[in-house]
Image (tube, rainbow, N blue to C red):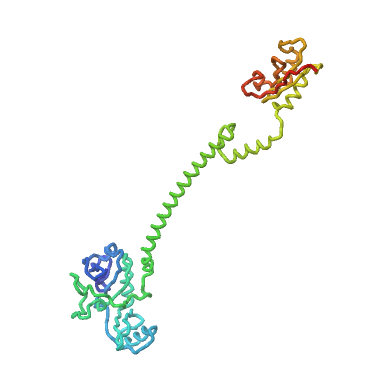
Amino acid sequence: MRLALPPLGSLAAATPVAYALLGRDRRVLRADALPLEELAPLARGHRVEAVLHPADTVVTDLVVPPVPRRQMATAVAAMIEPLTLSSVQDLAVGHTAREADGRVAVAWTDKAQLARAWRQLSDAGLSVHALLPTAAVLPNDDARPELPLSLPADARWQGAARRWSLALPALRPAAAPLTRWHGPLRWAAAAAVIWLVGLNLHASQLRQEAAQLRTAMQQQVRQAFPDIPVVVDPVKQATQRRDSLRAAQGTASENDFLPLALSAAKLLPPNAQRLAGLRYDKGTLDLTLLDDEGETAAPDAAPVKQAAALGLALSRTETGWRIARAGSGAGTHDAGGNGSPRIQIQQGGRP
C-alpha cells in the first residue's frame, strides 16, 4: 500500500490521503483518497510505504569519495552541511548506496516534522515500513519529479521503491515496533486457543475413561465381595475387605467344629459310652448314640434347657442328636439337607 502524504505540516487524522494498493506485479488494484484515520483496515496485511510531498524534502546527487560502508552516513552528513540552512542534527537524512562513479542520491527533511508525522500514522493504526521522498518511487524518465503523486493512479505510483528511506530507527514511534508482531501474536493466540480446545477435549476423554474404569471396578468389587452394601471407593473398600479376610484366617468362629464340639461335650450324659460317632458339616454337629432301648423320642427337657443356656439348638434325629448354634437355622435341617453347615456322628456297633 503506497500513501501520497500531503505536506507534513497539514497532516491530521481527518486529512484526506491518496493511496494505491499495488499487486505483486506492481499493477494498481485499487486507488482512492480517505481520511488518514480510515486507512488502517485497508492497510492490514500490506506493506505500507509513505511517500513524502516534494515540498517537504530536498533531493540531490553528491559525489562521495570511497569510504567504508559504516562511515557513509557520516561522510554524507559532512557533505550536505554546507547545503543546508539548519544544523544537520535537526535533519533526517537518507541516501542510496554509492555507485561506481561515486554518485550518491541524498534526501533530507526536518527531523521533528517527520517524527510527528510518523507518530500520527502510527496512531492511525498504520505500520509504516518506509518513508520515501517522491523521487525514490518515480520512474527514471519522469519529466516532472517536483510534482507530488496524485489521482488517478498512473505509472508514477507503480515504480519500485529504491532501497533507501527516511524512516530512521531513532524516529520510530515507541508503539510501532509492536505492530510488527501483531501478525505473529495473532497466530500465537490462535494456536493457544486450538491447544486449549484440544486439551479440554483430551481431558473430557480422560474423564469418560476414568468413569468407565470406576464403574467396572465397582462391578468387580460387588462380584468379589457381595457382602459390601455400597461401593463408594472401590480400591479402598476392596483392600480393607481383603485385609479383614486375611486377618480372619486361622481363627475359629462359634459355628466351627471345635467350639461347637466343646459345647456339645457339656451336654453328654455321664455314660459317655452311648456316643457312637459324630459328624460335622457347615455349622451343624450330629451325634450318633447307642440306645439299647431304641428310643426315638425327643430329648429330655433338661438337656434342651442346658443347650439353650449354652446358646445351642438341640433336636432329635433318627440316630441321635443334632446340635447347632441357636438362631443359625442350621439345626432345623435333616442330615441329608441341602448343603447347610453340619457335623454328623454316625452310629457304630457296640464296643
Residue 258 placement (x, y as % from top left): 74, 27
Q: Could you tell me which residue is drawn at 32 percent across and 80 percent down? A: 94
Q: Could you tell me which residue is drawn at 68 percent across and 21 percent down? A: 326
Which picture quadrant has residue 12?
A: bottom left
Residue 158 placement (x, y as % from top left): 23, 73
Which picture quadrant has residue 1?
A: bottom left
- In the orientation shown, which residue stands out farthest toward the right? 270
- As drawn, 118 above or below 272: below
* In this picture, residue 188 sits left or right of residue 239: left
Q: Quadrant of the C terminus?
A: top right
- As drawn, 315 above or below 178: above
Residue 98 visible to the viewer: yes
* In this picture, residue 20 sits left or right of residue 186: left
Q: Nearer the viewer, residue 62 or 291?
A: 291
Q: Nearer the viewer, residue 326 or 55?
A: 326
Which picture quadrant has residue 192?
A: bottom left
Q: Nearer the viewer, residue 286 or 176?
A: 286
Q: Could you tell me which residue is drawn at 72 percent across and 21 percent down? A: 345
State how many labels appear.
Answer: 0
Residue 311 visible to the viewer: no
Residue 70 placement (x, y as % from top left): 39, 83
